[in-house]
Amino acid sequence: MSRNIKPKLAVWKFASCDGCQLSLLDCEDELLAFANVIQIANFPEASRAVIKGKYDISLVEGSITTSHDAERIHKIRRQSKFLMTIGACATSGGIQALRNFTDVSRFTSMVYAHPNYISTLNKSTPIRDHVYVDFELHGCPINKYQLVEVCSALLHGRKPVTPSYSVCMECKRKGNVCVMVAHNTLCLGPVTHAGCDALCPSYNRGCFGCFGPKETPQTTSLAKKWKELGAKNDDVVRAFRGFYAYAEPFRKESEAHED
Amino acid sequence: MKTDKTIKVDYLARVEGEGGLKIRIKNGKIADLKLNIFEPPRYFEGFLRGRKYSEAPDITARICGICPVAYQMSSIHAMEAVFGLKVTGYMRELRRLLYCGEWIESHVLHAYMLHAPDFLGYQDAIQMAGDHPEIVKAGLRLKKIGNNIVNLLGGREIHPINARIGGWYKIPAKKKFMDLLDDLKWARDTAVDVVKFTSTLNFPDFERDYEFVALSHPDEYALNEGRLISNKGLDIAVDEYEDHFEEIHMSHSTSLHSKRKGNGAYHVGPLARFTLNYDKLSPIAKQAARDAGLGKECYNPFKSIIIRAVETLWACDEAIRILEMFEMPEKPCLDYDICGGIGHAITEAPRGSLYHRYRLDSRGYIRTTKIVPPTSQNLRTMELDLHEFVPPRLDKSTKELTWECEQAIRNYDPCISCSCHFLKLDLIND
């Protein structure tokens, strides 16, 4: 394939920890092959070189938390043919969306000596609330193999294979003993999107929801079961208020248990 | 020669996060120099309030995707300080092993993919791979070996899930640990060559009389425990940190600047650790440092790439030592009682000392938190480096000087995501 017809890739960052874009650099075995078929045109964390858009694929990490960023995402959308969000921050607002449940000025004065130097929005919101998003890849962090799968599906013009079922399916397939049934460990697995290969239950701990709510999650039944196991309202609220706190099914469930 | 120049770069690349640099030069002198950090604030100290102590390692890991192990280690040790819990023996060694994995992957990422392209004149590692495929491939393999440690012991390389207060959720089977050994021995051999290679790069003639600050331990190259010392007389327990250091909120930065009370700016990270703890390096790491022409101390920040290679070598050697004495602990996690109180911890993140302090109520809920990441401790020092670095180099072309200023910042492997985020170089000569 000659250089000038390689599709152009850009990676953009908003409020986030950098972990999801790092997943791309963590593809140690695939990175150079990837760079052979795709032109990394704008990826500041990895390169000084910037090639102008339009970009065939834009990967967007992070949530919108400032008015400047709320403008910037529109500019990025205009330069992108296919815009994909990567990770919990970009798809749900991330852990920083915990501010959405309180008055953010309280936090500013807690962290900064001169709150007047800080300009921030009251809410941390996902990219989808601001512009059209072509594809959302979940995870905190994303699964790098899913990232490779989605990019390769795009390059070949096919539909990406990313499961919509729950962590429970992955657990069963691995032959894990159910941590909730066997050990009464609170686990978000039944309502959480697969993608981590049932990581936490495989390490004897309950899932804490890194991949966000699956399609049609039965959060209310799960919370009821937890309470039978001795969970208090506060435990339920904190469990649903993690990295996907502002994703609607988790947000609603947490609000239902607020004292 | 009187010089007025305008140099502008919109987004400083190959750093983790978002920031900008603005230098105004008038009549050949720096009129104004500011490292602007406009990474949006994320308020971790705010929303940790009311969370349970056991959630802090998973939540604070999300401050930084590059060094989540550091956040987990500092938060776990701080909580254990509240509960009076001491993890010892092989469980403690396993924590060092996990940290070695992070040091290897983070140092190799920086040395190969973010820093080396500066010295060799490439925009990035992928461009560099076109001319030096073997070097880049070796770097990727080394990085993967570091990640494999974190993967096994932590569960995954970014935001691992297995470390907890009191120990681990699960300790994987011995065989899986032993499977790491062959690769690590290759990594150790390769790291010796990497030290050699980095020492042949061209370094600007630039040294400053830094106050180096790092954790120091009587028996080992410090990672998780020790006293905080400096080359200018500091020697304190970690719970005295806030008596000696303070954070200043500058208008041009969403990241706080740290200074040592009474002494000003200081320097944390590989150069500081190497200079303060040289004696604790393993023989193979000391030998490689000597062969690379390093003395027992290093005051040239551009040479941090050699020190990162030396620390990578040390971390491979230390990981092998820990694996070769493998003994399965009786149980993965110690028992403990929850109580209220204040706990402090400092651990050595790849970029330098990371301070955490928590106050818990009697049920183990977090009342207050303070986190001081290494990058905010280095921000003032980065600015001061540029104040000295730029004036004698004003004869250089704007393009060349801009790149060198970026490189001077990259010396610190700044993680602005940690400290906050966004580097943009904006050098104005008027």
Image (spheres, coloured by chain):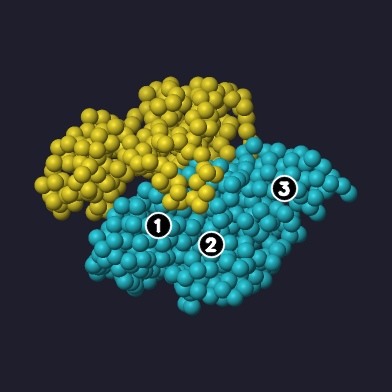
Chain colours: A yellow, B cyan
Q: Is residue A116 left or right of residue B426?
A: left
Numbered circle sitting on residue B246: 2
Q: Chain of mark 3?
A: B
Which chain does tag 1 point to?
B
Q: Residues within 10 Å of mark 2 (few under 14, many from 20)?
A: some
Q: Is residue B323 above or below residue A241?
A: below
- The x, y position of residue B51, in whole percent, is 31, 52
- Asked where in the image residue B305 lies, by quadrant, the reply is bottom right
Whether labels 3 and 2 belong to a single chain: the reply is yes
Marks 1 and 3 belong to one chain: yes
Residue at image coords 51%, 39%: A119
Give the CA distance from mark 1 to mark 2. 15 Å
Q: Are marks 1 and 3 in contact (CB under 8 Å)?
A: no
Distance (Cα) linking label 1 and label 3: 34 Å
Q: Residue at x 83, y 48 (%)?
A: B28
The percent position of residue B260, horizontal first and vertical second, equals 58, 65
Q: Name the amino acid type tagged 3.
A: Asp
Visible residue check, residue A254? yes
